[in-house]
Image (cartoon, rainbow, N blue to C red):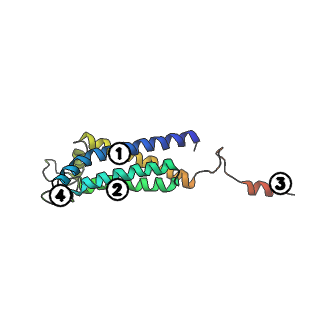
Amino acid sequence: MDENVEVALRFTAAQLAAATAGIHLWIGLRPLVLYTQAGRPFTDPRQALFVLSSIAVLVGIGLAAYGFRRDYVYGLGIVLALTYIVGWLLLGGHPEGTEIIAYAWESTGHTHGSPLGTLVEHLFGSIWLVTTKTIETVLLGILVVLLYHERFGDDTADGTTDDTGDAEAEATP
């Protein structure tokens, strides 16, 4: 991969990660503070998870900037992005009473009844949700490309493979 492309992808990934952290912090912090003031901070544990995951994303960005092994940072970023996406699928529905797990595809209270239709309705029902899921999906794709390049990409700056052992064998009579 060209060095300029790699730098652009890393910069874009950092920006997308910061955006998703900011959105989750924005969504989770106010309700968490209200629940904490009421003496019931874990009434809806999703709010605490939003805040903690936002902090984890920001720590990951800091680790990458500090020079921590990129493959680890990319791998952890992939896990976190997948957690956001799967977490929405498992917890993004309409919980009833005290239940926490409310699948985003359940059609309870919806007129169409199709699980796919319900997912689309939930996804596009909130500008924050469609924005964050789009950001997370693009971030996931970029992190997968960066991780693949970090683990299996070429090691030389000019993009050629390092065959010094074969070249030396051919040069000796």
Q: The C terminus lies in which quarter of the figure? A: bottom right
Taking the spot 58% from the left edge, 42% from the top edge, the residue there is: 3
Horizontal and vertical percent for residue 155?
63, 51
Eyeballing the image, is 49 above or below 131? Answer: below
Using residue 20 as the reference point, say whether residue 29 is left or right of it: left
Q: Secondary structure at mark 3?
A: helix
Which residue, given by chain and number where applicable, does mark 4 sit on? 40
Taking the spot 41% from the left edge, 51% from the top edge, the residue there is: 59
Question: Could you give the CA–CA distance between mark 4 and mark 1, rounded to whole angstroms?
Answer: 26 Å
Of labels 1 and 3, earlier in sequence is: 1
Which residue, given by chain and number where applicable, does mark 1 sit on? 20
Q: Nearer the viewer, mark 4 or mark 2?
A: 4
Taking the spot 31% from the left edge, 41% from the top edge, the residue there is: 131
Horizontal and vertical percent for residue 80?
38, 54
Contact between marks 3 and 4 (CB within 8 A): the answer is no
Which residue, given by chain and number where applicable, does mark 3 sit on? 171
* Front-lying residue, 88 or 21: 21
Of labels 4 and 1, earlier in sequence is: 1
Q: Amino acid at mark 3?
A: Ala
Question: Could you give the CA–CA distance between mark 3 and mark 2, rounded to whole angstroms?
Answer: 53 Å
Horizontal and vertical percent for residue 24?
30, 47
Of labels 3 and 4, earlier in sequence is: 4
Q: Amino acid at mark 2?
A: Thr
Q: Secondary structure at mark 4?
A: loop
Using residue 160 as the reference point, say whether residue 50 is left or right of it: left
Does residue 85 appear anywhere in the picture?
no
Q: Nearer the viewer, mark 3 or mark 4?
A: 4
Q: Nearer the viewer, mark 3 or mark 2?
A: 2
